[in-house]
Image (cartoon, rainbow, N blue to C red):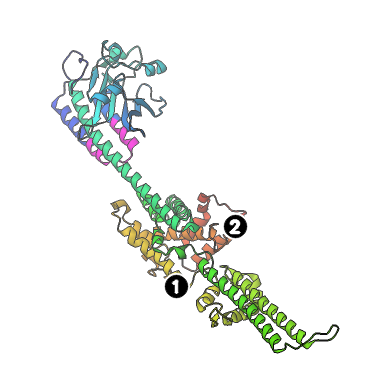
């Protein structure tokens, strides 16, 4: 594309052979640097810096074409540099893409503007110089080179603007000397910078694509966590808290300069890998039956409903049997006449039947109350049950042996052996079989995560997540790994997972433990060789748990 403003008179930049070789080498090194740049802000600053170096420009700026929510586009002012005014405050802002501004005109048309003196742009052209900067900072814009940054399809994705090509890079410009120490941009420089701008556009597009992919995957991870929590609302927020704790521990370890962990360092990508593994460590719960995931008590709600019906039928049966006994007795003693003031053996017998019924119903209610109490996950571990262990066992034995007549007149147990087994769980609310189903979520997580085509930097996510229930002494599951067989990142996550499980206030089957008790539990697990002792020490000494807003109530809590 050609310039819409004529160049200043004079020959193009004269470059001797040696300088050309140096320039080519510089361009090659710039191309290599552009190909590996990761951070967008650093990339844009690098592009502008090198463009200014090549052209000896005093100042410059970079705009990116930004698509808005309503599908309209604007120019986003991203980077600015100025050697003569180095401390200009920079704030990102958007301007509409119109032909009235220099950058807007280039963005719309894809044409390069090479203007010898922006203060004297001929009338009749659609664009003019925005003089606000010059007025605000006592600056004078003269020569300007504005180029489109276009991707390999020819689409303009940004605008590179260079200002005031100096005759000597060391000169500091003032409004008085600018006209004398600046010159027009040559055709040679225009070609070189345009080539650089094309390279830059490809690098920016690659960087943007990378950011979009990461943003997309971040959304996928968050959606996955929502799926987990929708199936298991009792642990809502658990995955995020474990991720926050594990990442905080990783950062803390990276900052450690002494001790056995001083050589352990985690860079940005490794931290990201740890975070994704932590967020997705429980994804396998999607393969666990929802009834088990959402189980609050020892018995399922539908089991309780059936048991309540049995109690109701048992009570009605007792009442019916009592009524039948009374009726049979009265039929057999139809000639009996009760005389006022006289003892009546027949009346005593009938009253005895009523009292027997009352005792039987009272016993039934006692069993029902015992059942409701035993149905609580921590029932058998509270002090009342410990003090009355023998009485409770006797009542439970009697309850297990209790039989009632159903509507068909057949004897049925009030509680089945399976229900008795569930009620007799010493802690928690899951049977051994249910625990096995829950534990399978670890394998499900691994099998799911293994299917994702992770990048090289994130390829360890499935393995890190797989071992979060393993213990260093081999007592964990599902593989029974020991020691160094468990990745150090997993060992960190395990500590975070245990901490959150003990302190979480949203678990219906247990109460959250106070911090000083959790600290002791983690310490004991480390002493027994189940958790990494050094990691636990860092976790506690540096109070990593404060990332969740948790604190110690007194100094002894952190001992």
Q: Residue 426: percent from the left, percent from the top?
A: 55, 73
Residue 202 in which image quadrant: top left
The span picked out in magenta is 30-47
Residue that badge 2 annotates: 557
Q: Nearer the viewer, mark 1 or mark 2?
A: 1
Foreground of the two, 505 or 465: 505
Q: CA distance from mark 1 to mark 2?
A: 37 Å
Secondary element at image label 1: helix
Q: Is residue 46 magenta?
A: yes
Name, please, the residue furthest toward the front.
Answer: 335
Using the rendered image of the protein, determine whether residue 537 is visible from the camera's viewpoint. no
Rendered residue at 33%/33% (across/down): 71
User: For this rendering, which residue is in front, 284 or 327?
Assistant: 327
Instruction: Mark yes or no: residue 16 visible.
Output: yes
Q: Residue at the location (52% across, 76% down)?
A: 421
Circle 2 sits in a helix, a strand or a loop, which is it?
helix
Identify which residue, 26 or 548, lies in the foreground. Answer: 548
């Amino acid at each position: 594309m050609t310039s819409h403003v004529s160049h200043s008179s004079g020959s193009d930049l004269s470059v001797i052979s040696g300088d050309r070789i140096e320039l080519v080498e510089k361009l090659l090194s710039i191309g290599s640097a552009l190909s590996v740049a990761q951070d967008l802000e650093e990339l844009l600053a690098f592009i502008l810096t090198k463009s200014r170096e090549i052209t000896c420009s005093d100042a410059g700026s970079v705009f990116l074409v930004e698509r808005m929510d309503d599908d309209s586009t604007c120019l986003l002012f991203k980077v600015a540099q100025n050697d003569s005014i180095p401390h200009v405050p920079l704030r990102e802002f958007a301007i509409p893409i119109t032909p009235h501004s220099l950058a807007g005109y280039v963005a719309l048309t894809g044409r390069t503007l090479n203007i010898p003196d922006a203060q004297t742009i001929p009338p009749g052209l659609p664009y003019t110089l925005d003089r606000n900067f010059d007025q605000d900072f006592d600056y004078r814009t003269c020569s300007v080179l504005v180029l489109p940054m276009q991707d390999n399809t020819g689409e303009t994705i940004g605008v590179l603007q260079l200002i005031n090509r100096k005759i000597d890079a060391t000169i500091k410009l003032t409004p008085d000397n600018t006209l004398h120490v600046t010159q027009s941009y040559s055709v040679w420089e225009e070609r070189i910078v345009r080539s650089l701008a094309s390279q830059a556009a490809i690098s920016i597009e690659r960087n943007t694509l990378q950011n979009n992919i990461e943003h997309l995957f971040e959304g996928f991870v968050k959606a996955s966590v929502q799926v987990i929590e929708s199936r298991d609302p009792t642990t809502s927020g658990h995955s995020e808290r474990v991720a926050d704790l594990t990442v905080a521990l990783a950062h803390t370890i990276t900052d450690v300069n002494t001790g056995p962990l001083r050589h352990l360092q985690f860079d940005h990508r490794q931290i990201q890998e740890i975070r994704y593994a932590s967020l997705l460590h429980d994804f396998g719960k999607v393969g666990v039956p929802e009834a088990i995931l959402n189980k609050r008590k020892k018995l399922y709600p539908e089991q309780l409903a059936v048991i309540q019906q049995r109690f109701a039928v048992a009570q009605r049966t007792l009442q019916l049997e009592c009524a039948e006994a009374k009726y049979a007795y009265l039929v057999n003693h139809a000639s009996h006449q009760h005389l006022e003031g006289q003892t009546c053996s027949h009346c005593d017998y009938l009253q005895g039947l009523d009292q027997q019924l009352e005792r039987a119903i009272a016993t039934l209610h006692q069993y029902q109350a015992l059942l409701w109490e035993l149905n609580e996950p921590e029932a058998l571990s509270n002090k009342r049950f410990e003090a009355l262990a023998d009485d409770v066992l006797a009542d439970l034995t009697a309850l297990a042996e209790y039989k009632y007549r159903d509507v068909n007149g057949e004897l049925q147990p009030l509680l089945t052996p399976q229900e008795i087994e569930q009620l007799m769980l010493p802690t928690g609310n899951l049977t051994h079989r249910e625990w096995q189903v829950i534990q399978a979520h670890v394998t499900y997580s691994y099998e799911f995560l293994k299917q994702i085509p992770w990048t090289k930097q994130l390829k360890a996510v499935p393995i890190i997540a797989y071992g979060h229930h393993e213990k260093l002494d081999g007592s964990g599951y599902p593989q029974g790994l020991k020691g160094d067989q468990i990745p150090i990142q997993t060992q960190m996550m395990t500590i975070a997972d245990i901490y959150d499980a003990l302190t979480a206030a949203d678990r219906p089957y247990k109460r959250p433990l106070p911090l000083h008790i959790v600290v002791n539990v983690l310490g004991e697990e480390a002493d027994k060789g189940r958790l990494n002792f050094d990691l636990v020490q860092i976790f506690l000494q540096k109070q990593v748990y404060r990332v969740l807003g948790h604190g110690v109530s007194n100094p002894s809590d952190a001992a």
